[in-house]
Image: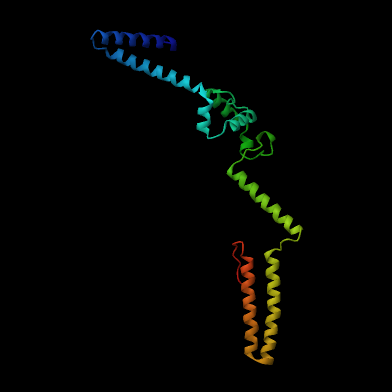
Amino acid sequence: MSGPAKRKANRRAAMSASENKRQGKEPTREELAAVKRYEDELEEQQRLKHFSAIRKKEWREWSGRQIKVINEQALRYGLPMGGPIINLLDFVRCFHDFLAKNAPKLAGRDNKDPTLAGFTSPAMERKRQLECERLELQLKRERSLCIERKIIHEGHGLIAGILRNAGEALFRQFGPAAQKILNDSLDNCAREIDRLLTIDGDNVEPE
């Protein structure tokens, strides 16, 4: 039995069951089953009817986006959600066609495509952030606004060696008290340099 014929049979059985109940008769098991099928069919028809006529206000509430944003995305990505009434069945089909068509781009293998301008993912956003930080650091180096920590530590070690040699000379000429004054000052300088180098929260191994 085809779909339309089955629906007609269910409808007739439901009407027969309703008439029997009106006359005080108990519907048969077959009639009750037909009534259940008929009610399920009516419910499905109502669901599809609502899905095919969603108001823009409902779509705005569901999406959490302003109408202006929804319309812009509809135009940019060719999705059927720009009108006052949205057919969810059409949208779902179009949306999945869009995903299938743009799978390589959405996966980041072709993220330079202008049709996906504004599209982002957490991984892509993190990559862009790191790239911006790298370019900013490179610009500061070119403008002599920053120095690599390695260079600072090398200079720090060189100066410390010179001053410790001076401390040994003071020890030989003036005794341990003079050497201690210089060494204490040198240690204080080392701690201050380490503090300045960790001002951004990075750990620096002590010399």
Q: Which of 20 and 86 is in front in this view?
A: 86
Q: How many labels does the image show?
A: 0
Q: Can residue 207 be seen in this view?
A: no
Residue 102 in picture, x, y percent from top left: 63, 33
Residue at 61% over, 40% down: 120
Q: Tell me how the rendering is colored.
A: rainbow
* Residue with the most extreme right position: 143
Residue at 58% over, 23% down: 83
Residue 186 sits above or below residue 122 on the image: below
Residue at 33% over, 9% down: 15
Residue 34 sits above or below residue 166 on the image: above
Residue 155 sits above or below residue 130 on the image: below
Residue 152 in picture, x, y percent from top left: 69, 68
Residue 160 in picture, x, y percent from top left: 68, 77
Residue 1 in picture, x, y percent from top left: 41, 10
Q: In which quarter of the image is residue 12?
A: top left
Q: Quadrant location of the C terminus? A: bottom right
Q: Is residue 178 visible?
A: yes
Q: Give left or right: position of 135 versus 176.
A: right
Residue at 64% over, 67% down: 196
Q: In which quarter of the image is residue 71?
A: top right
Residue 200 sits above or below residue 175 on the image: above
Q: Nearer the viewer, residue 102 or 1?
A: 102
